[in-house]
Each structure stands twice: as C-alpha cells, then as structure tokens.
C-alpha cells in the first residue's frame, strides 16, 4: 500500500511540533487498496523517536484511498527516526518514515539582480564611470534613448531589467523547508505546498548605504523592505535608519553584518548551487574566463548591442580583478518581518503554523555577485522570530 505525508514519500516528509498548545496537522494519504476494501490500524513503531497522534487509529481504505490527519506531539531526535505502520490484523502492509521538526523555516534560493553604482562613483550615479568593480550602465550617444536604463539600486528577485547576453535571469523560489531536529537544522525539499512558490521583494527594496550617509558599506540596510511568498504570505520591516559603524541595527529592517570571503566563512560551496568548481575563487576564475570567450564570439545585432559588448570586454580586460572579487564575496542580512503581515496558508502546514506567530526572522545571504551581469545568488530563510 502506498503511503504519503503531505504528498511526500517515505523518508521525505515531516510533521511540525507546535511551539504551544496549537496542533499543526499533516495529511497521511493511504492506498488505494488493490482490488479490495481493507480496514487498517495506524500506529508508530516501538523504536520511534517522536510521538505521533492520529485523527483515527482505524481506517477503512478502498479504491479511492483514504486520508487521515496526523500531528506530532513531541520532536524527533534524528532524521527519519519515527515510523508509522499501517497494519491489517497482524500484517504490516506499509511503513512510513518521517521526522518531527521544530521551528520550521521557509528556505528560498535563486538569482537576484541589482544594478547599482559603486565606489568611487557616487551611490546615485546613473551610469557608473569609475567603479572599482565594473558596475555601470551604457548610456550611448542619445541621452533620450539610452542603450541601457540608468542604474537604480533596486534588488530584484524577478523580472530583471536590461538583462545582458550570457547572464542568468533573476528568479527566486522556495527551495525547501528547514527545521530543527536534535538541535541541528535539516532541510526538506518535499512535503509542503509552499515549496516551489515564487519569492518576491517589494518594488523599492535597495541596498542602502548611500556612501556612508546611512551606514558603512557592508553594514547597510535593505531599505523599504517588503517580501512575499506567492499569494500566501507578505510582510514588511521597519524603515532603515542611519547606523553608526557596526553597532547593532537601529530598526528591524534587514541589515548586513559585514563583507566576507565565502570560501573562508562558508557554509555554502559552489556544488550546493550546481557549479562544478571546488571553491568560489575557482568559480570566479571560471565564470569570467567563460564569459570573455562568449563576448569575443558575440555577433551584435544592433549598434547599441555593439557598444554594450565593447564596454563589457573592456571591463573584463581592465577590471578583471574587481569583477572576480565580488564573485567570491558574501553579505549576510538579518532583520524582522513585523509589519503588515498577511498569511493565506491554503494547504501549507508551514504557513498554517506561521499564522500563530506575530513576527518572523528574515535571513538572506547575497553572494556570487557578477558585476558584469549585475546579478548574483541569494539564499535565506523566513521563520519564527526569537530563540
């Protein structure tokens, strides 16, 4: 007999242990039975680590199968340490291994775009003329019809602007559910309806140091922060305010905690995101070398495209170290989503759990930033605040 928990097969599903008196149910799907109707009992194996409660302990399963609500009353100590047994008489028809997690968090991953001026150009320079890292937009000979739109600092999780050839489009989605098990985080990539949903930022989200007016570079907020998960979750943070050096952030807006080499602090490796290189330094070398070859072989289809190509090749020749530098670095942002929260959980158990919470911790890591492509990799979590 087939058994699934919230659509996930054995060993891939989880239940959420509530933080208080509330129950966070999951749906255990049984069957269908093969050619007959059977009456089965549900139980957990004696060696199971978590305590599981069943809506019904005896269930009749026919050709259409049957669904039973279940919930976890205590947590697992390890992954898949709990087994539900489906029993007919003294015969075990099926076993389902699961994990009971605490403090579930939604993990998102993907590519983002940010077209921003960098030092020594002023933060609000529309075109970029002297960036240490090769950030610019090509204006072209006609100011009224620029080859590329001006820089705007907006952080985009979708719908990239003026995407250049040989660059990945922006797109961020829920990549899994992360939960605590035995004091350590574990990631599940199936088992909740929120997985796969698009994650979007508000239209005015910006990395906002303003040449030190708001914060030192590397310690800036994401201003006007709004985030959403599909049509099921949205929320905001407080506005970013000036920050003195690396002192604690003055508001709940997401602020960065510095600028670091990802090879030194981890935990992410290129392989975690589908890249073949062993280190981010190797990734930077390989990425720029590959792009130089593609740009040299590109056949522009317009005068504007030719001017953009020429500038890109020039930057890769004159400023290769700056481009490779940002590909190796990471900024980590953390803050609270504590304003204008709206949740429509549907059948998502995690979002159902979220409806009992007043605020959410946001953590986002932005890295692998290709200044020539004006985009990079982002991953992070949205989960319970505090603790």
Image: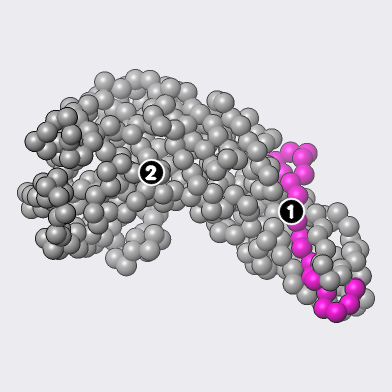
Residue at horizontal 44 percent and vertical 37 percent from the top: 201
Decide whether the magenta segment is chiefly helix, strand or loop.
loop
Q: What span is colored magenta in the figure? A: 18-38
Give the position of the N terminus as an image quadrant.
bottom right
Q: How crowded is mark 1: few (under 14 residues within 10 Å), some or many (20 or more)?
A: many
Where residue 366 appears, x then y in whole percent? 36, 44
The numbered mark at residue 361 is none
Q: Can residue 180 be seen in this view?
A: no
The residue wearing badge 1 is: 26
Name which of mark 2 and mark 1 comes first in the sequence.
Answer: 1
Q: Residues within 10 Å of mark 2 (few under 14, many from 20)?
A: few
Residue at horizontal 20 percent and vertical 48 percent from the top: 372
Residue 84 in the figure: left or right of residue 357: right
Magenta-span inclusion, residue 24: yes
Magenta-span inclusion, residue 30: yes
The residue wearing badge 2 is: 159
């Amino acid at each position: 007999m087939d058994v699934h928990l919230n659509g996930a097969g054995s060993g891939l599903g989880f239940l959420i242990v509530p933080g208080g008196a509330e129950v966070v149910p999951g749906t255990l799907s049984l069957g269908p039975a093969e050619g007959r109707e059977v009456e089965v009992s549900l139980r957990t194996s004696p060696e199971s680590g978590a305590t599981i409660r069943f809506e019904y302990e005896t269930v009749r399963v026919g050709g259409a199968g049957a669904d039973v609500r279940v919930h976890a009353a205590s947590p697992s100590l390890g992954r898949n340490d709990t087994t539900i047994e489906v029993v007919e008489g003294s015969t075990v028809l099926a076993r389902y291994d699961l994990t009971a997690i605490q403090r579930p968090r939604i993990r998102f991953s993907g590519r983002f775009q940010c077209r921003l001026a960098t030092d020594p150009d002023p933060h609000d320079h529309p075109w970029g003329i002297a960036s240490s890292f090769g950030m610019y937009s090509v204006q072209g000979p006609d100011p009224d019809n620029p080859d590329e739109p001006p820089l705007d600092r907006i952080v985009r999780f979708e719908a990239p602007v003026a995407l250049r050839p040989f660059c990945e489009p922006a797109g961020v989605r829920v990549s899994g559910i992360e939960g605590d098990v035995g004091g350590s985080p574990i990631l599940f990539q199936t088992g909740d309806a929120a997985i796969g949903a698009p994650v979007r930022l508000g239209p005015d989200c910006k990395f906002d140091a303003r040449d030190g007016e708001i914060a030192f570079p590397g310690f800036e907020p994401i201003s006007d922060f709004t985030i959403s998960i599909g049509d099921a979750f949205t929320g905001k943070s407080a506005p970013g305010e000036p920050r003195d050096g690396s002192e604690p952030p003055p508001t709940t807006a997401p602020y960065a905690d510095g600028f670091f080499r990802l090879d030194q602090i981890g935990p992410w490796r290129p392989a975690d995101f589908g890249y073949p290189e062993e280190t981010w330094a190797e990734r930077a070398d390989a990425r720029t070398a590959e792009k130089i070859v593609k740009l040299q072989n590109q056949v522009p289809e317009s005068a504007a495209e030719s001017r953009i190509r020429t500038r890109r090749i020039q930057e890769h020749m004159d400023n290769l170290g700056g481009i490779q530098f940002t590909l190796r670095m990471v900024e980590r942002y953390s803050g609270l989503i504590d304003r204008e929260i709206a949740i429509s959980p549907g059948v998502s158990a995690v979002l159902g759990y979220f409806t009992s919470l007043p605020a959410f911790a946001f953590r986002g890591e932005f890295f692998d930033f290709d200044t020539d492509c004006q985009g990079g990799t982002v991953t992070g979590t949205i989960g319970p605040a505090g603790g």
